[in-house]
Image (tube, rainbow, N blue to C red):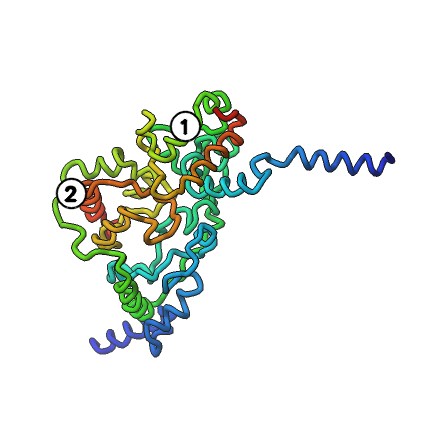
Amino acid sequence: MRSLSVVFLALLAGLGMADTAMAAGGADVLQQQCSSCHALTKPADASLDRLWERKGPDLYYAGVKFNREWLEAWLQNPTTIRPGGVMYAKAIKASADKTADTIDTGKLTPHVKLGKADSAAAADALMKLGADLNLVQKGAFKNGSPGPMAKMLFSKLRGCSSCHSAKGGDGGRSGPELGDAGSRLQPDFMVAYINNPQKFDPHIWMPTLGLTDADVQKLTGYLLTLKHTEAQ
Amino acid sequence: MNIRMLCLTGVLSLAGLSTFPAYADDATTRSARVYDTYCAQCHGANRDGNGINSTAMAVKPRDHTDTKGMGDTPDEELRKAIKSGGGAVNKSVLMPRWDGVLSDAEIDGLVSYLRVVSKSGSK
């Protein structure tokens, strides 16, 4: 009976997958499934026009940005990270009555969904990207307590929540949602990106605020506390 | 001038009238793209302070179509606000500094563009 259950589960898993990775390696999955929208190597074109034209966020530094477990799970069940897509300005629906502009979700393309094996292979391959580019300094996050002011820095004093939501729908919409930033992103990456977003994404619309290291450490510590739970 | 010519002239004048002056020349077109990239997220596609982020903000972004308010603001103050942020001109800190992202030439272009959008003269 037990072996029957195992066979049944294996069959179910087989049926649920649209995997190409059974034989192919992770690098092949990236080429076949990801490369038409995402840059897997640093693009030569660093112009503002490219920022408007790219179809998906660059992944050439994915290995120093993401947490592997998050990648593997998200690729199987992609949820919204960027409410306005990769270039919010192209999805804006201008208000006609002096209320706030809205996002035309019809202009957004849903992310491809990978099967379990492809996701695992893609996650492995993505984690190999970017380590040699010297974009993120290992140990940049000093792992201190974010302190009581950290949330206030995010939501008011440094204005992060004007563009980013930290909890479902609460906050701005032109930047990626950060409600699960603690699960998604590596802390040293957060420090590096907050300090200089344009180093990663030339001309990106996140300002380089020139924050003190103390502020950046607190903000990173706060972002690490943001995680989606099973109940959400 | 025959009737046909008259109609053609009328159509051309109408087309001319409907062309938004913001797209009148290359410099303005370039600045409009810079505005759409960085400013529209808060100041809105209509440039009137109603961007997609505006509902999340404690202080509403400036209405750049306000001819009077913008006309009363000197170029130097606009430049300073864009370059160093709202805090530098005693306005909301939610307006970030852009000197780490935009060049001086791009910022000057935005100041000129704001005069076009607000239909206010340079000061």
The answer to whether residue B63 is left or right of residue B29 is left
Inspect this view and state whether residue A206 appears.
yes
Q: Position of residue B28 (x, y in %)?
A: 53, 39
- Please give the chain letter of the residue carrying mark 1: B
In this rendered view, identify the residue nearer to me: A177 or A27.
A27
Amino acid found under the numbered disc labelled 1: Glu
> Residue A131: horizontal and vertical position, in percent?
26, 63
Q: Quadrant of residue A63?
A: bottom left
Vertical position of residue B58 compared to residue A169: above or below: above
Q: Residue furthest right?
A: B2
Residue at the image position 46 percent from the left and 45 percent from the top: A89
- Residue B84 is left or right of residue A157, and the answer is right
**Residue at numbered disc 1:** B76
The residue located at (50%, 40%) in the rendering is B32
Task: Name the amino acid type tagged 2.
Answer: Pro
Residue pointed to by mark 2: A146
Residue A24, position in %: x, y? 35, 76
